[in-house]
Image (cartoon, coloured by chain):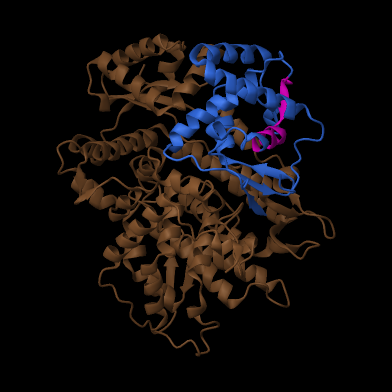
Chain colours: A brown, B blue
Amino acid sequence: MSSHESSVNVTKAATERLKNKVDSWLKDTLGAYSPVHIREDKVIRDAVFGFNVFRQYEINLIDSPILQRLRSIQQNSLASLTYPTTTHTRFEHSLGCLSIADRMIRAINEKSRTPPITPLQIIEVRLAALLHDCGHGPFSHASEFVYDKMSSELQDVRSENMEVFGDAAGHEILAFFIVTSPRFERLWKEVCSKYNPTLEEFQHDPRDVKLIRVGRIILGLPSEGCPGYLSQIVNGPFDADKFDYIIRDGYFSGLTTYVDIDRLAVSIDLYRDDNSESTLCMDIGGATILEQLLFNKMVLFSSMYHHHKVRAAFRQLALLLATARANGTQIGGVRLSSAVDYLKLDDDKLMCDAMQQPDLRPLASGIKLRRLPKRVLVIDRDTLKDPASKEKWVQIGADPWKVEDLQTAIANGAGLPSEKVYVDFPPEPRIYKTAKFSMIRRASGRPLVSLDSLYPVAGWLSGYEQYRFRSYIFGPDGIQEKVAQIAEGALQERGISIDFDLSTRLAKWV
Amino acid sequence: MSVMVAKEQRPILGITPWQWRARLTDAVLGSFSLQSSGNTLPESMPSDKVFAAFYKLRNRYPEWLGSLYFEEGHDTLVCKGLEDVLFTLGAFGLVTVKKHDYRNLRINREIRKIIKKQIEERSSEQKLKTLRRLSNEFTRIIGERNEGRHRTTKE
């Protein structure tokens, strides 16, 4: 076993606990599922990328409960309450990610007389693309916020295995443990047993697949037999995941975004350095696609991901989950004590069952009927009066107890239950990795250069940071003025002065 | 491109990512403002240098910087945790960039004084002692010549 692979065979307590829980969940989820022989490869039509071919054994996985549950998990959580057509799910995204990964692989192989990516590697990269989101819980990042950010369970797993999990997202860690679990291995063997790999249509025997390599591709890590550039096709500076979600989210939200995806096949390539190590790169023409990708990412943040109504719905849903967790309330017979418990739920099950629970019903019905909290105050760099206030506000945003304390103070002051007031700091967009690590072949015979050395793409991030980013205090409809005044007082007690007039006008209830 | 994590780092368990974020914010603000030798930290610093400095300091201050994870590629470092904190400081005007040139971070002396005062007011002596040491080391590393372009040789 290589040094790469040995690093995941950990015997750390938190890691072992999580591995066992995931395997146990998978046993229950797969239940009696038994893969059947699929006669031939299947073609699936996608609204965004057209016809895509899926191999027989991939269809077995697509038909399994592991991927079917993603049909009931919306890609953009509750963004559909603001952009009604944004109803696409993690399922379509997973298929789309495979489709883009396949385009990238084909383009790389067609550029060389000896195709660098072997048939076995192709199977593994395609599987990783297909399964990369199988660790998502209900409403995607909304549940991840609760089971990851507010608990140490997954952070402990990261800390025990920094070289493997580093700062992998919670759902990526769960996907890794699903794909590398004993129960998944058994499923994969059952799937492979349905086919005769000596047939010509099988360019390589799928039984040779190493699931540990598939798991590591999901994390963006290299393995023995799987160089780094292959992992980067699924999880890297510019990867199939980003191409699919940015294009798909733009398409289904109706926001006018454009990424010239056809150019990808022409421009993607491998660069071999003096040590014969290969790096995924773009030719100079392909730099434009990456610029489009990042620009559109910022458009999506500005218009959708950070839309105040999307954020209000997100906060309400996160509170619902946190309340269930704190009260020990069961949802669908599940007590939400571990990240793995969220895998037992999907969007529909969560909302239906939350409606049956007295402590969750008000929050759940608010979401179902779109009775969401309103902006009471908008707080940005212009509404905070002085540097001392800015620093204190940043400190509140960084500390969950300070956020809760402020929410409670405002709610108490207004005579409201504490769940009626939210202080929201939206998550930061990130583009440094794509900007700095995307490599461009500027001229033949010259070293690669980073995307940001050709064009300062991360300037879009600093522009957003400076002119668009806002935090919010949300409260109930109809009493915004009263809550705003109490909130201003609560902020003053904490040494924070705001331009009240500007803050309320930005909140648009004046 | 490889993933780089110093081997000697010991895991610190039982802390949520959000709590790590609070510690990191304190550590970054402290590094920018708590130098005991006066304002020797330049107002404007290349962001690559800032990332490289925190990479160097990470193992010496695990209780503050232990959640940071760095990825290395082609002479530079990327770290999501630091990127997030610097974004927030920028969003609320504590750190600025000139003409959107994110490659240079600027934190002016007046703001630094205010931050220093606030951290001193709310922190215990023990905490202040550690943050001041961190700040001094940060200042020294930023002042070193040729720092910033990250070398691929591991420490």
Q: Residue at x 69, y 26 (%)?
A: B137
Instruction: Give the image location of residue A282, x and y in percent.
Output: 70, 57
Residue B49 magenta? yes
Instruction: Give the image location of residue A36, x and y in percent.
Output: 33, 80
Asked whether, in this view, residue A268 is left or right of residue A95, the answer is: right
Instruction: Give the image location of residue B64, x and y in percent.
Output: 54, 31
Residue B81 lies in quadrant: top right
Residue B95 lies in quadrant: top right
In this view, which residue lies farthest toward the bottom?
Answer: A199
Quarter of the image that includes the N terminus of chain A: bottom right
Residue A455 magenta? no
Image: A395 above or below A301: above
Q: Is residue B95 visible?
A: no
Instruction: Give the image location of residue A340, x and y in percent.
Output: 33, 52
Q: Residue at x 39, y 45 (%)?
A: A153
Q: Residue at x 73, y 63 (%)?
A: A277
Asked whether, in this view, residue B91 is left or right of residue A18, the answer is: right
Quarter of the image that includes the C terminus of chain A: top left
Q: Is residue B9 visible?
A: yes
- Magenta span: predominant SS is helix
> Which one is nearer the viewer's eye here, B63 or A205?
B63
- Looking at the rendering, the stretch of residues picked out in magenta corresponds to B41-55
> Which one is nearer the viewer's eye here, B37 or A133?
B37
Q: Residue at x 60, y 56 (%)?
A: A260
